[in-house]
Amino acid sequence: MLLFNETKKVTRQQGWCLTGPPVEEGEWSIRLLAGTLSGLWYDVQVPGSRSLMLNGTGIITMNWGRGTAYQVKFDALDKHYTAVYPEAGRYDLLIKGEVHLITEFDSLASDSLKGEIKAFRNLTALEVLHLAGSWVTGDIAALPPSLLQLSLLETLVHGDLAAIGRFPLLKKIDLTGTLVEGYSGTLLPAWANGIELKFRDLQLSAGDIDELLHDLAATTTENGKLDIGGLNGRRTSNSNLAFTALTARGWTIICVVGHATFGSADISFGDANARFEEEAA
């Protein structure tokens, strides 16, 4: 059998066991690939290349859905991996092997990547996940708790914003413009100072905003940045004490503080209900 970290030329693929002449002839004998990332695919409308940026340790085998696969041995450096799709269609992405050692997955903002967020459940060492601009869906609570950075900007993910409490190591998160529906409250972790939380345009209610500020104030995190502006509710006086405590500790909070309406005579392109929202930092 091959040593754990030894790679050999692959001459034939049978399912997901790589086979070839006997070991004594210097080729693969057999290698079982245990872990799996599945449930993502490229919906290719315009033929061309699609790329991922991955990082980690260990060895994985990537199948881009075109009937071929190749093996990757990580060396702790960010690497771009690219496949060319000459025809439109659906191409299922399948990664097998030591997926539990992958630390970074970046879709490079591909708007043709679709699938379920639960595809990442076996990536238990995942620290950085960037899927902004893709069409992934599913509940954010399905993601591994090892995450340090998470960007799901303008994706179709959903769930309770309280799921952020599952990520004790978090340093930066952006859920702007997703389908996350409200905040039910939770005991938030003692995140490292300097954490960045961006929750713009989630249609959060005033009650959601107040409760989130209360829960943040109850943590021991001294400072950070919270952006809950855009299409969210306006916080009320119920969160005044929490807001004051957070800003006194060094937090920067961007939120809606008021609104005004104008008639169409004042806004040449608007209607009688035209509205702007003021934000404060």
Image (cartoon, rainbow, N blue to C red):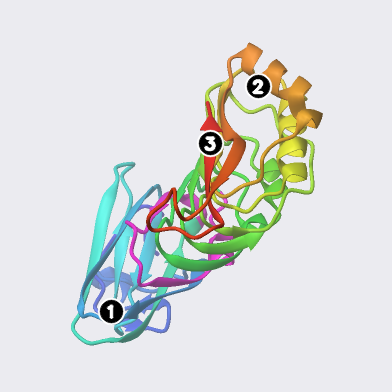
Q: Amino acid at mark 2?
A: Thr
State which mark lies toward you, 1 or 2: 2
Image-quadrant location for residue 67: bottom left
Task: Answer above or below: position of 82 versus 250.
Answer: below
Residue at the spot 62% in from the left edge and 62% down from the top edge: 158
Where does the magenta region start and end?
100-124
The residue singled out by tag 2 in the image is: 221
Q: Quadrant of the N terminus?
A: bottom left
Q: Secondary structure at mark 2?
A: loop
Q: What amino acid is at disc 1?
A: Pro
Residue at (67%, 40%) from the top-left corner? 234
Whether residue 265 is visible to the viewer of this picture, yes or no, is: yes
Amino acid of disc 3:
Glu
Seen from the viewer's position, the closer of residues 85 and 102 is 85
Would residue 62 appear left or right of 86 to someone viewing this image?
A: right
Q: Is residue 102 magenta?
A: yes
Which label's residue is closer to the chain start, 3 or 1? 1
Q: Which residue is mark 1?
A: 21
* Image vertical order of residue 104 relative to residue 70, above or below: above
- Residue designated by label 3: 278
Compared to residue 21, the image places residue 158 above or below, namely above
Instruction: Say which element carries label 3.
Output: strand
- In front of the other: label 2 or label 3? 3
Question: Badge 1: how crowded within 10 Å, few (<14), some, or many (20+)?
Answer: some
Sequence-wise first label, 1 or 2: 1
The residue under the point 32% across, 56% down is 108
Give the Cα separation between the discs numbered 3 and 1: 69 Å
